[in-house]
Image (cartoon, rainbow, N blue to C red):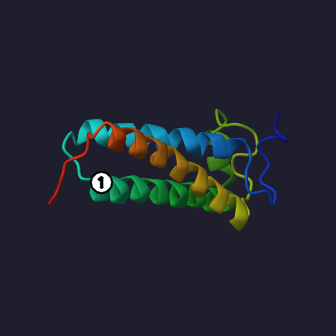
């Protein structure tokens, strides 16, 4: 199972699915948290959370290299969680997360659930 979580030079891996679901989840959370949100603010907040999450992952991986104890404290995470990601894989994860956000955006736009700003 740990081979699935290894970050190679592939654009998509099993963690891309996690980012896709995260994009859907954060989008729904933002829509239900801010009931009357404009389309522009929806995208700004959703994409900001997605970018911050990716930087948080990179931060955890960076400090785990220097602090072996930190890596052992997160033993509930899948094997290979702290392995390095290639730039192309990070881009793939961001695209997968964006697709999750886009799907929710299109559904709510079709239902006309966004605040109309003139």
Q: Residue furthest bottom?
A: 87
Q: Residue at x 34, y 44 (%)?
A: 109
Left or right of 9 in this view: 102: left
User: Is 40 left or right of 61, judged from the image as shown?
Assistant: left
The percent coordinates of residue 11 (x first, y second) are 74, 57
Above-or-below relation of 22 to 53 = above
Q: Secondary structure at mark 1?
A: helix
Q: Nearer the viewer, residue 86 or 91?
A: 91
Q: Residue at x 27, y 41 (%)?
A: 112
Horizontally, residue 3 falls left or right of residue 31, namely: right
Dot 1, how many residues are within 10 Å of its Cα: few (below 14), some (14-19), or many (20+)?
some
Q: Residue furthest front?
A: 110
Q: Label 1: which residue? A: 39
Q: Quadrant of the N terminus?
A: top right
- Work out whether residue 70 or residue 23 is closer to the camera in this orientation and state it: 23
Whole-percent x and y of residue 48?
A: 40, 59
Where 36 sits versus 118, above or below? above
Looking at the rendering, which quadrant does residue 3 occupy? top right
**Number of marks present in the image shown:** 1
Report the residue at 52% width, 61% height from top.
55
User: Residue at the spot x=48%, y=43% of the render?
Assistant: 103
Residue 57 at x, y percent in the picture: 57, 54
Picture quarter with the C terminus? bottom left
Q: Nearer the viewer, residue 96 or 65?
A: 96
- Residue 46 or residue 62, whichever sits in front: 46
In this image, 79 relative to 112: left or right? right
């Amino acid at each position: 199972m740990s081979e699935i979580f290894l970050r190679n030079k592939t654009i998509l891996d099993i963690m891309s699915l996690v980012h896709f679901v995260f994009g859907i989840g954060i989008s729904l959370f933002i829509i239900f948290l801010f009931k009357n949100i404009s389309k522009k603010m929806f995208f700004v907040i959703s994409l900001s959370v997605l970018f911050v999450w990716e930087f948080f992952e990179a931060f955890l991986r960076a400090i785990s290299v220097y602090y072996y104890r930190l890596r052992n404290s997160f033993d509930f995470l899948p094997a290979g969680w702290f392995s390095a990601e290639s730039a192309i894989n990070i881009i793939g994860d961001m695209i997968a997360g964006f697709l999750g956000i886009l799907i929710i955006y299109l559904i709510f736009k079709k239902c006309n659930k966004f605040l109309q700003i003139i």
